[in-house]
Amino acid sequence: MAREITVRFCKRYEIFIVFVLKFIFGMIIFAMISEIGRPIDMLEQVSDLATGWAYITLMSLIFAITPINAGYLLITVNLILQTSAVLEVALLLGLFLFAVQGLYTRLAPQECVLILFMLTAYYFRLPYLIPILAGLYYSMTAIIPIAIAVFMWQFLPLLRRMFRAGEDTVFDIGGLTEVYEASYAQVVGALASNHDWVIISFIFAMVVLVVYAIAHTSIDYSKDIAIALGGVVTVIGFVAVVLVTDVRISLPGMIMSTLISVAVAYVIRFFDVLLDYNRAERVQFQDEDNVYYVKIVPKMLLGDKVPEPEAVRRPDGIRGPTDNERNLVRVADPAPTRPERYPAAGAAGSEGYSGWAKRWEKLEEERAKAQKDKV
């Protein structure tokens, strides 16, 4: 009952709820940005405003009402402005973010939001949640934005060190080449010495693949099983990494964070489509060219009494179609197109079970005649 009320409320006020969630998400993102660096000296007068809640609230409102690509551009501009006190760092960061936007986010706008989700999850020490959700609700290509986010988070300390080192220096356009040569050497050296992001991205990729593979099978409760297996693969993967490599991860903290992530994933799953596996059926039928094996799992309808599947018997004693089998008439014989769900037995103004049984009998006769003519 509580689930029905909650889901019905969310569906009724979906637009408002999405706006509020995007606004809260924007507040978190722009609050994180305000902790990175500081603006250039010429913006010193608005520096307090730029790091205050008034500016963060304004940016969050704009983020909540704009598409994801525009929101990503807004975040990129704010990051560049926030690190503009050291122009070398701001330019390097801007080149990287615009490259990501041009090469990926414009091609996959729905999946690029995983970059922001992953960075936010890292901020709250729950990075193991996003690969599980990505495997449930996205395709296998979700590995790409997750790897990008892991790379960005792992090299955030390097960005802060470069910012602190350049903050005490005076910008000289004549020495810009030497500055970028030194910055390039730092970045290449960090890439050569830090392989943690590759290993972590690999584990998260395995989690995405396992969850995706299990969640898209026909077994009962596949998504629930996929969430649990995603948590198991995460724990096993990071324990193996700690034992074999020199990656430093707190195992108790990782296990606790994984358990919380799995619990949060089940809470999100609570709002997903609820299936009635007790009424699941496997049906076989054929046409002139193919044989179809179909598993039918009805959705659990909120607030309605769900009737038990009932078979109809024709006058000659042969079993007629069940409730699920009647729906397959639309697949095998699409002539009578109806936008609404086929009516149940006894519904006012409907054919009822007997009418559909007659249609089923007629369809069987047509199939038998077609097979006879073919022979």
Image: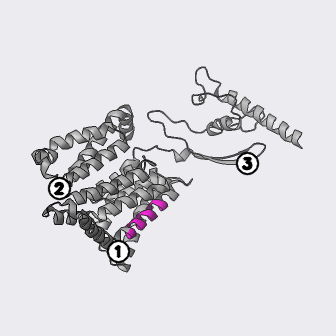
Q: Quadrant of residue 285?
A: top right
Amino acid on which disc 3 is placed: Val
Q: Position of residue 138 (x, y in %)?
A: 46, 51
* Residue drawn 17% across the image and 64% down it: 166
Distance in Å between CA atoms under marks 1 and 2: 28 Å
Asked if residue 256 shows in the view, the reply is no
Asked if residue 92 shows in the view, the reply is yes
Tell me the crowding category of disc 2: few under 14, some 14 to 19, or many 20 or more residues within 10 angstroms, Cα based: many
SS for callout 3: strand
SS for callout 2: loop
Image side of residue 217 versus residue 160, left or right: right
Q: Kindly report which numbered mark, 2 or 3, lies closer to the viewer in this rendering.
A: 2
* Residue drawn 46% across the image and 44% down it: 274
Q: Position of residue 2 (x, y in %)?
A: 35, 40
Residue located beneath label 3 in the image: 291
Amino acid on which disc 2 is placed: Ala
N-terminal-most mark, 2 or 3: 2
Distance in Å between CA atoms under marks 2 and 3: 68 Å
N-terminal-most mark, 3 or 1: 1
Vertical arrangement, residue 194 with respect to residue 300, above or below: below
Distance in Å between CA atoms under marks 3 and 1: 56 Å
Span highlighted in magenta in the image: 198-210
Image side of residue 351 versus residue 45, left or right: right
Label ID, residue 192? 1
Label ID, residue 85? 2
